[in-house]
Every structure is written in structure tokens, then in C-alpha cells.
Amino acid sequence: MQIAAGKLKGKKLIYPARGLRPTTDKIRSAVFNIIEANFPDLLESANVCDIFAGAGAVGIEALSRGAASVTFIDNDQITIRYLSKNIQGYEAKVNVIRLDAVKAMQRIKTEKFDLIFLDPPYNMNLVAPVVEKIAEYDMLTVNGIAVVEHHKKEIFPIPDKLELYKEKKYSDTVITILVKRR
């Protein structure tokens, strides 16, 4: 797994051999291509939150493409060790929170993000409560987006404060992009 574009293009990332389902290079590239084509100024100096960050590939890709800062959230100690190694040299631009996603979000609920990524373990019913908290805590800036990677069978309600922008299917994976308009 490596960074696809930007100033860190080609940077190889390390991750545990088992227990992690990292976003594939193909899907990560597709997501960032969608963002750059549809929200061209979003990444420049963006404040990003990567929930269920794993080894940090998505958040590091955002840094590589111009994000000002990334808050990484994950609750697995082993995964956090890999993430820490992957972000060496960029500590000034990152905040790592080792907590359950909903508890971590409660801790940072007053922060605003231009871009939130969310890629929970599949089929564990984690998408809906986290998307609900994003809306409840009003964590997105106006015209900010949440990118949700989930299994095609995991359907979740879209809160009133967010609207569906786009959905793309990649085999069993679905990328749902939500935007805050008001």
C-alpha cells in the first residue's frame, strides 16, 4: 500500500498482516479523484478527520494532497502503532486519538472538519451511529463532506443535516459521499 498522489506520492505504508481491511489503492484513488473533480478547493488547507483510521492511508493521502491537518481516530492499540510509524515526520499536522469512534467524536465534538472519512469494519452496524454523531455534533463545515466506505449490504439513514451527494459501488464496497449544505 502506498500514497497515490501529491507531495508524498509513492510513500510506502506499513500495516498489520491480519485484522485490518485497508482501503485499497484503487478505491482510495477513486475517492480522491471524485473529491478533486467535484470539490476542487476542498483539500487545500483542509481540516480532515479519519475515523476508523487503521494504518492511516486515507488521512495520509489527504495530507499528501494538501490538507493542513488530520485527526486520526482508531481504538486498536496495534493499529495505532503502525499508524504512528506511518505518520513519522508529520506529527505537527496530526492528532491521533485512541478511543472508540463515538467516544472520540464526543471528545472533539466542537471541532469542525472540511472532510471526514469513515471506514468502519464491515457489517458491524457502526456506520449509522457515527454518521448520526457527525450530524448531531455538526462536525462538518458548510459544504464539507463525509466520505463513508461501507459494505453494500450496510444501509444507513442520512440525517437531515446532510444530503447524499454521490454513491459509487466497487464490488462489495460502496462509497457514499454526504455533503453539509446548510
Image (cartoon, rainbow, N blue to C red):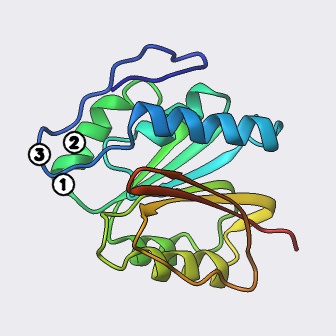
Residue at screen point 11% across, 45% down? 18
The residue under label 3 is which amino acid type?
Arg
- Of residues 174 and 22, the one nearer the viewer is 174
- What residue is disc 3 on? 18
Q: Select label 2 or label 3 by which is in front.
A: 3
179 vs 23, left or right, is right
- Tag 1 or tag 3, which sits nearer the N-term? 3
Q: Measured from the top left, where is residue 51 in percent x and y? A: 45, 59
Residue 31 occupies quadrant: top right
Relative height, residue 36 to residue 153 (above, below): above
28 vs 176, left or right, is left
- What residue is disc 2 on? 81
Kindly check if marks 2 and 1 are in contact, taking CB atoms under 8 A apart as contact: yes
The residue under label 1 is which amino acid type?
Gln
Residue at the outermost left position: 18
- Of residues 137 and 91, the one nearer the viewer is 137
Relative height, residue 33 to residue 151 (above, below): above
Element under label 1?
Answer: helix
Kindly check if marks 2 and 3 are in contact, taking CB atoms under 8 A apart as contact: no
- Of residues 72 and 15, the one nearer the viewer is 15
- What residue is disc 1 on? 77
Residue at screen point 27% across, 63% down? 75
Relative height, residue 11 to residue 161 (above, below): above
Determine if residue 45 is in view: no
Q: Measured from the top left, where is residue 118 in percent x and y? A: 48, 60
The residue under label 2 is which amino acid type?
Arg
Q: Measured from the top left, where is residue 120 in percent x and y? A: 37, 63
Residue at screen point 22% across, 48% down? 79
